[in-house]
Image (cartoon, rainbow, N blue to C red):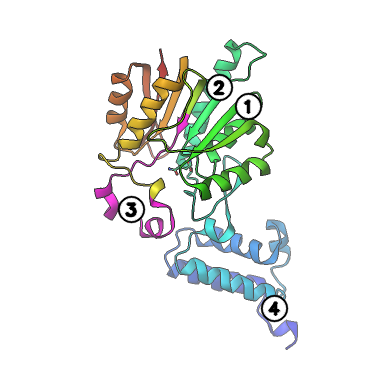
Amino acid sequence: MPATDAPTLDALMLQAIARLRAAGDDSPHVCARALAQAATGLDRTGLLLAGNTPPAPDQAARFLALVARRCHGEPLAHILGQREFYGRDFTVSPATLIPRPETERLVELALDHMRQQEALLDAAAPPRLADLGTGSGCIGITLLCERPRWQALLMDISPAALAIARRNAHIHHVAPRALCLLGDMLAPPLAPRRLHLLVSNPPYIAPDERPEVMPEVLRHEPHTALFSPENGLAHLRAVCRAARHALIPGGVLLLEHGWQQGPAVRSLLTASGFSDVTSHADLAGHERCTQGIFV
Ligand code: GLN
């Protein structure tokens, strides 16, 4: 068949957008463009320039196959094998939580503290942070990329997740400053009084909230990264305990939590003796992160 009889890339894109929308994708244009880029190897400009011509048959077939996977509910991040977080691409797999935009707020807050602490520190000794339940490593690795003096302990209970974090540390050139450690945040193997900052986006969904979690999330993301017993607070409580043990005086604990858990997390931190306990809202206006200073 002459190439001219085949549908153009633009025509394929329009079909894909309609199918993605019908399947319930909430941003079908963005999704179709990302899948077309993955199938053709073209960047955004390349896609625009190639719009009037039919793609090579193998590229068209690849594109349709990717669209079909997305229409069956597979997360876009899993199809692409990556997700952008704080301006960088992170490798993800079904073993890791897919990084969320809310978590970028935690990163911004952490960066503010890191800058403040750097100003007070002895220039010779590298400041240290830990990211408990690191998953893809998106939080800890972003912090290392942004603040080159720091070293980090990236800990996760899942060997498969930790392998992804390790790969991301290499991709983003921070592996020499990142120690990837297998460990359970309910009993983390941390040395006392060594950390300047402890960050965590732990599992925090209560098991009985399961019916409210999106089916796509339940089907494709690791439940160990999502659910925590004791009303969703068991892991938050454990991280708080770990922070009391591992932070130096003046060190900062920063936690992400559920949008209704702000009051509970603040009392947890206050009862554990943290000072300046404050919660911060995400872009939707929900309390999403809480911080405290270890005194
Ligand atoms: N730290 C990772 C993230 O924020 C993973 C968090 C988790 O698995 N609960 O995406």
**Amino acid, disc 4:** Pro
Q: Is residue 210 left or right of residue 68?
A: left
Q: Position of residue 111 (x, y in %)?
A: 55, 26
Pointer 4 residue: 57
Would residue 103 be visible to someone looking at this image? Answer: yes
Pointer 3 residue: 213
State the residue at coordinates (50%, 23%). Answer: 197
Pointer 2 residue: 114
| Residue 147 - label | 1
Q: Position of residue 176 (x, y in %)?
A: 67, 33
Examine the rendered structure and indicate whether residue 156 appears above or below residue 123: below
Q: Does dot 1 land on a helix, a strand or a loop?
A: loop
**Amino acid, disc 2:** Met
| 115 within the magenta span | no
| Tag 2 near tag 1, CB within 8 Å | yes
Q: Position of residue 117 (x, y in %)?
A: 55, 16
- Quadrant housing residue 125: top right
Distance from mark 1 CB to nearest ligand 1 atom below 8 Å:
no
**Amino acid, disc 3:** Val
Tell me how far mark 4 sits from mark 3, CA to CA. 39 Å
Q: Earlier in the sequence, mark 4 or mark 1?
A: 4
| 217 within the magenta span | yes
Would residue 279 be visible to someone looking at this image? Answer: no
Tell me how far mark 2 sits from mark 4, CA to CA. 51 Å
Tell me how far mark 4 sits from mark 1, CA to CA. 46 Å
Nearest the viewer among 26 and 119 is: 119
Residue bounds of the magenta highlight: 199-223
